[in-house]
Image (spheres, grey):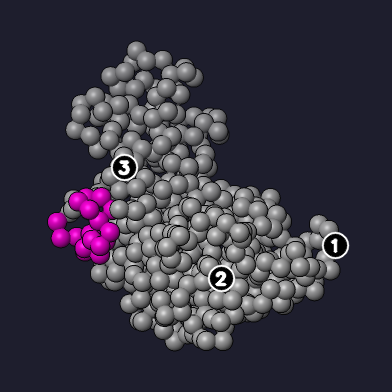
């Protein structure tokens, strides 16, 4: 091994190597695994025709029945009869233009987008092994492959949604597999968390970035004016420039070298907060939820970070990108509403923050001319029971309603079938009186939902089949909302 300039006295034994590289650079790659490397600028350039998907995962199981609900008198009466204290007033709903559906009044920030027909509800989506009727569900043997693993379980259903699979042992996520199949310049980029299973492929894990203002890995070293920091950066660069015969060590060195490059390339963009750049269009779009240089909600900060990365796509590199953000707190078993009103409470607070952040993000994309190029969509591990429980909450369900937003969205239409609002009816898994809760059997699969999004992103039929192997069991394969 060659000597490092000005550091001849250092012997690179195993302990010293780990001290120099492992601890300092682990955060620079976030969750990026050993063989999961971002392409360098020489390998990947920002391409014309840029497109991006933004997954917003609502952890805990969002109550879709109080997120997207009927506005016509007949179905609303059925809804109100079962929902009782949890029922939202019919006059309070935010109309989804062109449909007979409305949004929770807490989502009023999305009203202009609904009127512009750039928001689409996708109805009764969930994990399925193949299309499933109630009779097939009821007659299936124990451990039948027809029944997705771990129904009504948070952890299992999160895996199934993130993996695009009906099997809870799935190792990879449909976002990660898609990034690999499409050969995107970056893996899935996750903000505010590691993206769990969604961004994993066989060769990549997500690139995890902090919220605005956060220090990204060794960004403070590689871009620092400190002489000590510059010396450390020089030493690390030299370390990773040494040849090695060991394949594992070669891969590790390549990873760390990439981490240095990514930190230098993205650090300033990641760190930027509202107000740091005078007159920034994105900052103006997020002004309704900004105080000083701080965005007021976690989901807002994450989507602001994504908006910057879209705007800075020449720096981020690549013509296609998948992003992942998340909002928790949707496990509303009790006190879903306040004592004063069904339109207030825990669920309303969550949806208010979500809708405001989504609306600001939409406006930001419009302001930078990327509205047609970026599509945002929700996921959540399951819906909740149609029948409330005795604690003014809801329990774990199955099929759920999702929202897709963006200038490329074909709004003014509801996609999929709204469940029949009858306990024990054809869409409810229950038959016996003690199981009549309104846990809807999905009529659209996660695969169909994902395939529609990925088809818009640019995936071919062959790539879709590779990413979503069970897609072939569903018709139509793509639903057409973008």
Disc number placed over residue 184 in the picture, else none = none
> Badge 3, how many Cα within 10 Å: few under 14, some, many 20+?
some
Indicate which label's residue lies in the foreground, 2 or 3: 2
Q: CA distance from mark 2 to mark 3?
A: 45 Å
Span highlighted in magenta in the image: 278-295
User: Gap in Å between the C-alphas at discs 1 and 2?
Assistant: 35 Å
Judging by the rendered image, the residue that carries numbered circle 2 is 84
Q: Mark 1 or mark 3: which comes first in sequence?
A: 1
First along the sequence among labels 1 and 2: 2
Looking at marks 2 and 3 on the same chain, the residue that comes earlier in the sequence is marked by: 2
Left/right of residue 9 with respect to residue 75 in the rendered view: left
Element on which disc 2 rests: helix
Out of 4 and 401, give the one closest to the viewer.
Answer: 401
Residue 22 appears in the rendering: yes
Q: Position of residue 186 (x, y in %)?
A: 43, 53
Disc 1 vs disc 2: Cβ atoms closer than 8 Å? no
């Amino acid at each position: 091994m060659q000597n490092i300039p000005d550091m001849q006295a250092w012997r690179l034994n195993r302990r010293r190597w780990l001290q120099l590289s492992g601890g300092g650079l682990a955060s620079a790659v976030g969750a990026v695994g050993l063989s999961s490397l971002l392409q360098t600028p020489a390998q990947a350039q920002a391409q014309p025709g840029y497109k991006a998907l933004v997954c917003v995962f609502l952890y805990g199981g969002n109550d879709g029945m109080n997120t997207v609900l009927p506005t016509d008198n007949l179905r609303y009466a059925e809804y109100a009869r079962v929902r009782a204290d949890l029922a939202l007033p019919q006059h309070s709903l935010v109309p989804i233009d062109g449909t007979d559906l409305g949004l929770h009044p807490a989502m009023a920030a999305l009203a202009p987008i609904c009127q512009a027909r750039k928001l689409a509800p996708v109805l009764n989506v969930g994990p399925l092994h193949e299309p499933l009727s109630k009779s097939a569900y009821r007659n299936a043997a124990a451990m039948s492959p027809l029944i997705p693993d771990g129904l009504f379980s948070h952890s299992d259903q999160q895996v199934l949604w993130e993996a695009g699979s009906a099997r809870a042992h799935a190792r990879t996520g449909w976002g990660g597999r898609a990034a690999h199949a499409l050969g995107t310049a970056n893996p899935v980029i996750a903000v505010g968390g590691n993206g769990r299973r969604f961004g994993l492929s066989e060769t990549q894990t997500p690139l995890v970035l902090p919220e605005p203002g956060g220090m990204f890995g060794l960004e403070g070293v590689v871009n620092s004016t400190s002489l000590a920091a510059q010396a450390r950066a020089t030493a690390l660069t030299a370390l990773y420039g040494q040849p090695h015969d060991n394949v594992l060590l070669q891969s590790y060195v390549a990873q760390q070298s990439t981490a240095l490059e990514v930190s230098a390339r993205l650090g300033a963009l990641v760190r930027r907060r509202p107000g740091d750049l005078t007159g920034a269009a994105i900052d103006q779009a997020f002004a309704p939820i900004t105080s000083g240089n701080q965005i007021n909600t976690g989901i807002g900060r994450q989507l602001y970070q994504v908006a910057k990365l879209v705007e800075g796509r020449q720096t981020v590199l690549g013509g296609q990108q998948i992003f992942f953000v998340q909002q928790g707190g949707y496990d509303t078993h009790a006190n879903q509403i306040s004592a004063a009103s069904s339109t207030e409470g825990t669920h309303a607070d969550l949806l208010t923050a979500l809708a405001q952040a989504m609306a600001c993000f939409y406006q930001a994309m419009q302001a930078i001319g990327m509205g047609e190029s970026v599509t945002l969509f929700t996921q959540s591990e399951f819906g909740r029971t149609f029948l409330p429980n005795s604690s003014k909450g809801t329990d774990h369900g199955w099929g759920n309603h999702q929202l897709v937003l963006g200038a490329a969205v074909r709004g003014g239409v509801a996609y999929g079938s709204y469940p029949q609002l009858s306990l024990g009816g054809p869409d409810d898994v229950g038959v016996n009186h003690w199981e009549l809760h309104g846990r809807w059997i999905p009529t659209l699969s996660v695969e169909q939902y994902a395939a529609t999004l990925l088809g818009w992103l640019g995936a071919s039929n062959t790539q879709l089949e590779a990413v979503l192997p069970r897609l072939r069991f569903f018709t139509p394969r793509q639903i057409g909302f973008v």
